[in-house]
Amino acid sequence: MRRFADRVALVTGAASGIGRATAMRLAQEGARVVCADVNKTGLAETVELIENDREWAIARRCDVSDPAAGAATVADAIAAFGSLDVLCNIAGVGAFQHTAAVSPDEWARVIAINLAGTFFMTQAALPHLPARRGAIVNMASSARLIGQAYCAAYCASKGGVVALTRALAVEFARQGLRVNCICPGGVDTAFTAGFAPPPGADIDLVRRLALVPEKASPGDVAAAVAYLASDEARHINGAALSIDGGMVVS
């Protein structure tokens, strides 16, 4: 498929995991891709993987929690490729931790990257996307719907991403911009591998999240991102799509 021929996509969190898989999938479908992340080494690897398939990509170091960095990355995308059609807000952080042990700095970091970063990147892209009848795909989590022990900051941030997605979907629906989000459960990435139960955790509270033993692959989630960003999903707006093997059924 070449659903993104002659289109430009900006993907945050592109140095690894779902972000890398998304950048590669969009490039394979014809997009010119701006890969953004704070991990310069991982970004270089992603761009090399894309260019090995004779596609176009550039890397930009970007801390999404910094509004100026987000604005500069969007400006670089316009300068390099002349337009912007798709924004994929995938950069994120999180870990299991006892709520009583979460410091103010740790709380602020999770909210700044997962929620505020999604907002700042969106705000920077808004002058460009509606005229192109573009799409935004945000990365939320199954944690937005169910109680998840030892993840207070992460759950709060991802719940906020869903609420933000829906607010933007309504505000810009008549301007040609669609905004959706994806809510993965377990995904086989280094990021989720870092979610080790904290010392003294009640393991039964963690096990309740595992309805099926298999995790999704980053490519599974990237395929859903590509669908929501494409014209095939032109009547989908404000959706929160679960990819969790049925863990959350509402």
Image: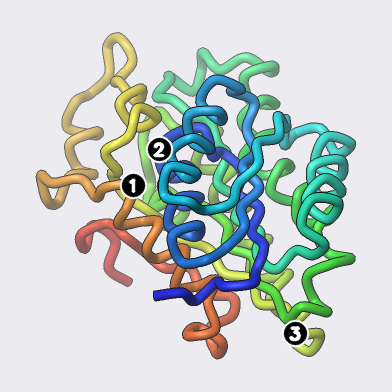
Residue that badge 2 annotates: 17
Q: Nearer the viewer, residue 1 or 71?
A: 1
Q: Is residue 114 left or right of residue 195?
A: right
Give the mark, 3 or 2, whose residue is nearer the N terminus.
2
Looking at the rendered structure, the secondary structure element under dot 3 is loop
| Crowdedness near tag 3: few (<14), some (14–19) or many (≥20) residues, C-alpha within 10 Å | some
Q: Is residue 154 above or below residue 82?
A: above
Horizontal and vertical percent position of residue 112: 71, 34
* Vertical comparison of 194 with 130: above or below: above
* Circle 2/circle 1 CB separation < 8 Å: yes
The disc at residue 218 is 1
Query: How far is the residue under mark 3 from the one under mark 2?
Result: 30 Å
- Sequence-first tag of 2 and 1: 2
Picture residue at 54% right of the left edge, 39% below the top: 14
Which image quarter is the C terminus in?
bottom left
Which sits in the foreground, 238 or 230?
Answer: 230
Relative image position of residue 79 (x, y in whole percent): 86, 51
Q: Residue at x 50, y 83 (%)?
A: 233
Q: Which residue is mark 3?
A: 176
